[in-house]
Amino acid sequence: MKHYIPDNLIEEIRSRSDILEVVSANLLLKKSGQNYKGLCPFHSEKTPSFTVSPEKQIYHCFGCGAGGNVFKFIMEMEDLPFLDVVKKLASKCGVELPNPKSGQSNARQSEREMLLSINEKARAYFTRLLKDDEGGRSAREYLKSRSFYDEKLLAEYGIGWAAPGWKDILTYLQNQGKCSRKDLLRAGLIKQKEGAEEGNCYDRFRGRIMFPFKDIHGSLIAFAGRVIGEGEPKYLNSPETPLYIKGKHLFGLDRAREAIRKQNRVLIMEGYFDQMRAHQHGIRNTVATCGTALTPAQATLLKNHTSRTTLIFDSDSAGQAATERGFGVLLEEGLGVEVLSLPKGHDPDSYIQQFGPEKFLEELKNARPFVESYIINTIESGDISTPAGKMEVVNSVLPLLTRIKNTVERSEWVRVLTERAGLDDQAILAELKNAIKQDRNIARQPAKTSERAGKQNPELYIVHLMLADKRLALQIKEEVPVDKFEDPSLRQIVELFYQLIDEGCELRVDLAIDRVEEPTTKTLLSKIGLEPIPFDDKERSTNDCILAINKRSLDQKIEALIKQRDEAFEARDSERSKQLQDQLRELRMELIPGQVPA
């Protein structure tokens, strides 16, 4: 590779730049033996296959094959040419580089530096104009009306003002900044007038509050402008340029990434003012999508820093649609997704401004997993009083559930759906499995069960099993308390059987009948004695019945906890709501297939 930097300096920069430190600033890594592992930033994966070797100072992904040294990593991560990476690391580790001779600069590197320089000159012009007594008055008044005229905050973000004139920035940068019209077009700051001769250009941003847009590393790559009077669009972004590709960056990520990594959580908001308001009040783990749908590239950026995301979009239909799309994108990258619904009419900016950051953080404790929130909203807007209404709810939720590939997580959400909508768990679970297997997003109405199947009763089976096998009777007595039986007659029979066992008596129907007073219980006992149920595998049937009865008991506890949690949520008692949610999660784990209740 031809460049003006001597090889000995390249080697010195490489030796001073620890690859583990560099990669760790971009990815979440965990120690694995002598190496460190994490999720690969260059392809989508859920199981870490990206490995960093501090000893060899290299990285390699065993999933996609990406690999190299510290220079290659930054080149790939930041899409930078080699010389830019060398300069960046040299500056960081204190190595002085020689000045390039004429003609030695890389063309791509030169263009990037030129565009970054133009953007910085434009930012300086916009910020100076905002402070101008007359020229920036309307912009300052607008910012004051939104309680945003905080000089420290505006300076930190580089907020400015683009005058309403048609050629203000064009004239300034050509005359004072020594920038060519061609370069300004390349930077996206001016536009060619349609139908006019070449060179007839005008300012892209006019009469707008200007937001500098930086990439994750703090380089100023684009602008966004917010109109303060009448006009469309409300927000105008830079076009795509060699520096800026739409959907690859998130506003505020350069400031937020350390807080995101530290808290292992990112708050995803919609607008520039939302992110700035949160940052102003010390809520630093925030980014904004700024009017665009969340993209896989943005999700990948976040995945490199956290495993938990919280979507905080507007509560209107557009905001809810954006939340649903965002969930799908984040889920594909293996990220956990929660959603926070603020009171109607509020966004993070207005809520924090009106109620303060402490109240916002309290609200944040009530953020629910997106799937749970979606299920609740679907049920509340549907009609679960009829079988057809229940199936409509199922078919609304099913496409969401089929996207969840983790079987344990999916089982829990099926449980939530069946609890909330009053559905038959096994029927819906079976239909969900079939839908996933057949790649269907529509559930069919479960077939009606036969009369005999409908009469299956684990409590009745328990009585038959106790009469059939003394060893199993002892197991049942040990594992199933009497108070877990709901049928009064069967509870009386089981209580009697437990007494007979304690007295060392044989379990026989004829003996039991003599000790029963209730006529209906006597009748049931005699029927049980004359119609014994044959079991192919008594031990397995016993375990199944014990599990079913204990499961039903857990279901009742869960139902009670859900009611208490919802009451706490409505009362804005976030601490109790969280405690009850944790208890619910523990109980639900006991109901996941393969788990045995304690």
Image (cartoon, rainbow, N blue to C red):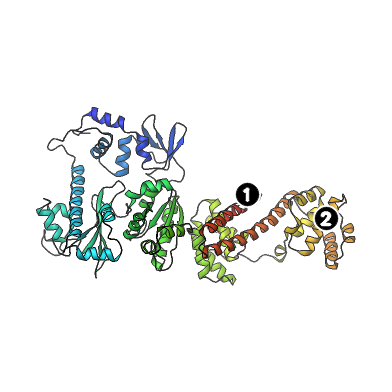
Image quarter (top left, top right, bottom left or bottom right) of the N terminus = top left
Q: Which mark is residue 297?
A: none
* Callout 1 amino acid: Gln
Residue 431 pos. (x, y %) = 57, 60
Q: Is 123 on the left-hand or right-hand side of 549?
A: left
Q: Is 429 on the left-hand or right-hand side of 68?
A: right
- List the single residue furthest toward the top: 8
Task: Determine the image quadrant of residue 281.
Answer: bottom left
Between residue 98 and residue 592, name the one nearer to us: 98
Q: Label 1 belongs to which residue?
A: 595
User: Pointers 2 and 1 in contact (CB under 8 A)?
Assistant: no
Residue depicted at 71% across the width and 53% down the height: 546
* Callout 2 amino acid: Phe
Residue 445 pos. (x, y %) = 58, 66
SS for callout 1: loop
Residue depicted at 39% across the width and 51% down the height: 285
Q: Is 573 on the left-hand or right-hand side of 147?
A: right
Between residue 544 and residue 353, name the one nearer to us: 353
Q: Label 2 belongs to which residue?
A: 497
SS for callout 2: helix
In the rendered view, tell whether residue 235 sits above or below residue 26: below
Between residue 404 and residue 304, name the one nearer to us: 304
| Observer able to see residue 354 | yes
Callout 1 crowding tier (Cα within 10 Å): few <14, some 14–19, many ≥20: few
Q: Is 589 on the left-hand or right-hand side of 235?
A: right
